[in-house]
Image (cartoon, rainbow, N blue to C red):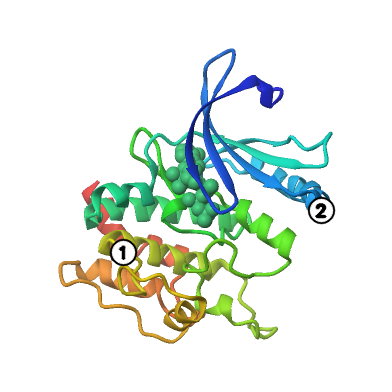
Amino acid sequence: KIESLSDLEKLEVLGHGSGGTVYKVQHNRNSSVYALKVIRFEQESVGFLKQAISEAEILKQVDSEFVVKCYRVFDSGRDSEKGDLCFLMEYMEGGSLNDLLRCHGRLPENVLIGMAKRVLEGLKYLHGLHIVHRDIKPSNLLINAQGDVKIADFGVSRMIAGTLDASDSCQGTCAYMSPERFNSDNRMGSRCDGFPGDVWALGLALLECYMGHFPLIAPGKKPDWATLMCAICFVEPPEIPKTASPEFRSFIYRCLEKDWRMRATVTELLSHPFVIKYNSSA
Ligand code: ATP
Ligand code: MG
């Protein structure tokens, strides 16, 4: 049982993100290994920190083999003016899909097919709890020692962005934001609830893994906000290489449908021929 942060020893830095640092940590007494994400808050936002912690309570209720487990949330700033918000998570040995891309350049379809299935199962679970992830991207899809992919960081960045900015602005990156999220004039009545945005981001992340670079922008370029927004909202989806199977192309195009009302849902995608092909080959 972990009582406080002092029960944990930092072993190494696993990575840095826009909001903080992730460490590999070990329990002092039973030597279990975890990942600890530390997000630093400045003095003026300590009030928001408290709110973020109460929202983080929902994280602990999430329990699925397709979602990285968050065991505890620590507020190390309780007694000081500065606060660290710490998330104790399941340690994922294999790192993220981003790390995998850095090593291998790109991933073959037969690997992506199993990953797609697991991420869809994870989204089905979260959406069933009325949770929109809102930050699906290769660096938030993590792999464990068995090679299984799980969804990470759901809620964390959204909570931080949502509570501190009270807006849907580009915190970190907006590269995986769906077209409807750029449209503030999402009229009442047909207002998007956010679930289709997770499907868009999944399609984009899988295509990125297949192509080896962010698919909407020419490789090597670092786009400004306007270029990115234009590519997402107005430019047709990119040509998928001829090497891809018809099922994979169709799957990706169903995710990258610009109009969220036309986009495939998670349920539809779980019975898409691309995923069915995996079921019958596994
Ligand atoms: P951003 O902050 O823009 O969302 P990010 O997702 O890369 O980017 P973090 O979530 O802080 O930022 O994660 C940083 C890195 O730490 C990840 O890319 C991943 O390699 C590693 N990491 C995060 N969580 C875990 C975990 N539970 N187990 C193992 N490694 C992890
Ligand atoms: Mg992350």
Drawn side of residue 120 relative to residue 162, left or right: left
Q: Position of residue 203 (x, y in %)?
A: 39, 66
Nearest to the observer: residue 14 or residue 278: 14
Q: Evaluate whether residue 124 shows in this view.
A: no
Q: Evaluate whether residue 38 shows in this view.
A: yes
Q: Amino acid at mark 2?
A: Glu
Q: Is mark 2 within 8 Å of ligand 1?
A: no
- Whichever of labels 2 and 1 marks the residue nearer the N terminus, that label is 2
**C-alpha gap between disc 2 and disc 1:** 38 Å
Give the class, few, some or many, for how many residues have Cα within 10 Å of label 2's Cα (few <14, many ≥20). few
**Residue at (69% x, 42% y) in the render:** 85
Q: Position of residue 122 (x, y in %)?
A: 48, 51
Nearest to the observer: residue 11 or residue 4: 11
- Identify the residue under disc 2: 44
Drawn side of residue 239 relative to residue 192, left or right: left
- Identify the residue under disc 1: 213
Q: Is mark 1 within 8 Å of ligand 1?
A: no
Q: Position of residue 232 (x, y in %)?
A: 45, 78
Give the answer, above or below, for where 122 lies relative to 162.
above
Q: Position of residue 43 (x, y in %)?
A: 80, 48
**Residue at (64% x, 79% y) in the render:** 191
